[in-house]
């Protein structure tokens, strides 16, 4: 990793200890926030009403000791066992077949007939917190990714094997369940009420040091980070390091206002920029994962970009604001509502759009099937359009299924989107094909499918669109491999998908 390059780090210890660039290990991280002190005894609950007392004075340096004493026992250490593919013994890194990025495609050509590299168990650590007395635990999705076993350790040293009820990579939220009763719980706050400059406190297990407490202030709100379209992050300067991922961020009232998730760092460790998932976002995801095993998101079908000062002037705006529509997908809700490329969306259902990054979380949280009112500026004039929000088409990117559900044919484990006419023309395709926008656990990842690939054919059937892909996956044989034709750059290749019958 170049020392001049700003790296984004997900905080989970153990698993990444072997990923080294030069002399620096790339380590995953978690978001942290400071908490307040002096918490009087009272009933534990998941509503802010139960956390009325302020645990630290807002006029001086806060004492967080009472807050930690009361809610610290609800913060847990999470240990995961994962399997990773190991490189062949004695092989130089980056060589085909020896752990390089192109192994899935090049290994068969160099070592046809030889067994694939074995998978070895690797231990990783993160944090979490208990949200119900009967054992629901909230953490980050990246903490439990690829886990074959998840263990939750309480502050009283009891340990439980946890079940992953569901995880959502789009927001990096996961819900675990342990078999226990009468557990200590945290109290939920309202992240919308959080103000820049307020004290926050983080509790977690950095580098495996359990129940470590760090504090800081809210540095900014509504931060948009690369690849995290649906999360308006809380930025803090609370110290977070590998192992803090999934831990709670408290306000001075002792309420959880966020989940520590990521840091920006040149070293892999804390450098003053920590980011937390707002608890309002996390709890909406948690409720859907527990109820259905997956998360439904609204979809308009537009491509957007930010507004520079020059673009704003060219579109007749007095200053940069809103989301500039660069593309409208055919037959999408946006197209049916009359939205056009060049429109500037300045309001969505009563919520002002200051930056382009404000729009995706609002659309994602909109009620599927409901109507949304869009205020747009077109040719210098304000217009109001109404769009019916549809569900974002995803091929189970959450890797989650509700308890008791039998997923007979399983899923690919990818998120996909239909190609626009412009994209098809660029690729030289007359019709069909779907774009892979994200890859999670599952047969697709194991076959070597990557983000940016275009899926053209499954078995003997051409893939026309995302809807047909779901139908083809559902009808695919559950007990034998099936070929999938993939366009990658200028090349087209077949990959073999394993059994589609497993969950995830």
Image (spheres, rainbow, N blue to C red):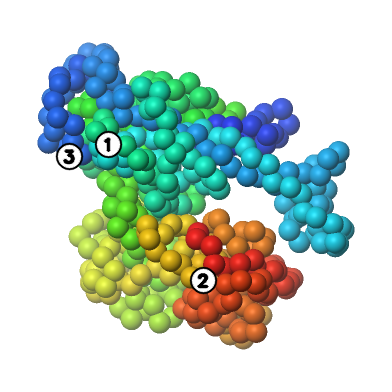
- Which quadrant would residue 493 be assigned to in this image? bottom right
Q: Which mark is residue 409?
A: 2
Q: Which mark is residue 199?
A: none
The mark lying in front, picked from 2 and 3, is 2
Which residue appears at 51% of the width and 67% of the height? 410
List the residue tagged with mark 3. Answer: 47
- Which quadrant would residue 133 be assigned to in this image? top left
- Which quadrant would residue 430 be assigned to in this image? bottom right
Q: Bin the neighbour count of mark 3 within 10 Å (Cα to Cα): few under 14, some 14-19, many 20 and up.
A: few
Q: Is residue 228 above or below residue 499?
A: above
Residue 346, x across and y down, in percent: 29, 61
Tell me: 156 left or right of 241: left
Of residues 341 and 99, the one drawn nearer to the viewer in this rendering: 99
Mark 2 or mark 1, which is nearer the start of the sequence? 1
List the residue tagged with mark 1. Answer: 181
Asked whether the viewer can see residue 418, the reply is no
């Amino acid at each position: 990793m170049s020392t001049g390059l700003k790296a984004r780090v997900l905080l989970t210890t153990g698993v990444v200890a072997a990923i080294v660039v030069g002399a620096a290990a790339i380590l995953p991280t978690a978001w942290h926030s400071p908490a307040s002190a002096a918490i009087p005894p009272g009933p534990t609950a998941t509503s802010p009403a139960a956390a009325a007392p302020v645990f630290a004075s807002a006029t001086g340096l806060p004492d967080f000791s009472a807050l930690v004493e009361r809610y610290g026992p609800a913060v847990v250490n999470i240990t995961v066992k994962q399997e990773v593919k190991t490189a062949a013994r004695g092989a130089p890194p980056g060589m085909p077949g020896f752990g390089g990025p192109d192994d899935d495609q090049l290994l068969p050509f160099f070592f046809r007939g030889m067994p694939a590299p074995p998978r070895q168990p690797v231990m990783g650590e993160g944090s979490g917190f208990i949200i119900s007395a009967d054992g629901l635990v909230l953490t980050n999705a990246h903490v439990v990714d690829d886990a074959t076993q998840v263990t939750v350790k309480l502050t009283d040293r009891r340990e439980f094997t946890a079940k992953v009820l569901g995880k959502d990579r789009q927001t990096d939220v996961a819900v675990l369940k342990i078999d226990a009763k009468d557990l200590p719980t945290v109290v939920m706050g309202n992240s919308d009420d959080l103000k820049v400059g307020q004290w926050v406190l983080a509790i977690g297990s950095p580098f495996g040091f359990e129940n470590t407490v760090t504090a800081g202030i809210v540095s900014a709100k509504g931060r948009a980070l690369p690849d995290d379209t649906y999360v308006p992050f809380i930025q803090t300067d609370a110290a977070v390091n590998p192992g803090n991922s999934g831990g709670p961020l408290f306000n001075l009232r002792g309420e959880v206002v966020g989940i520590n998730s990521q840091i920006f760092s040149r070293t892999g460790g804390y450098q003053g920029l920590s980011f937390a998932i707002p608890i309002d976002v996390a709890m909406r995801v948690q409720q859907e994962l527990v109820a259905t095993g997956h998360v439904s998101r609204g979809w308009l079908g537009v491509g957007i970009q930010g507004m520079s000062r020059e673009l704003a002037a060219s579109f007749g705006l007095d200053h940069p604001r809103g989301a500039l529509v660069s593309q409208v997908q055919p037959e999408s809700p946006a197209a049916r509502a009359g939205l056009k490329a060049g429109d500037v969306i300045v309001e969505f259902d009563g919520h002002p759009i200051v930056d382009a990054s404000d729009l995706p979380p609002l659309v994602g949280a909109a009620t599927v099937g409901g109507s949304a009112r869009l205020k747009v500026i077109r040719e210098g004039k304000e217009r109001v359009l109404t769009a019916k929000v549809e569900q974002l088409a995803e091929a189970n990117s959450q890797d989650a299924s509700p308890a008791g559900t039998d997923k007979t044919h399983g899923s690919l484990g990818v998120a996909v989107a239909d190609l626009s006419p412009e994209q098809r023309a660029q690729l030289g395709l007359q019709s069909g094909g779907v774009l892979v926008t994200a890859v999670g656990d599952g047969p697709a990842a194991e076959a070597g499918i990557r983000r940016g690939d275009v899926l053209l054919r499954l078995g003997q059937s051409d893939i026309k669109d995302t809807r047909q892909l779901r139908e083809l996956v559902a009808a695919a044989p559950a007990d034998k491999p099936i070929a999938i034709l993939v366009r990658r750059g200028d090349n087209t290749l077949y990959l073999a998908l394993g059994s589609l019958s497993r969950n995830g």
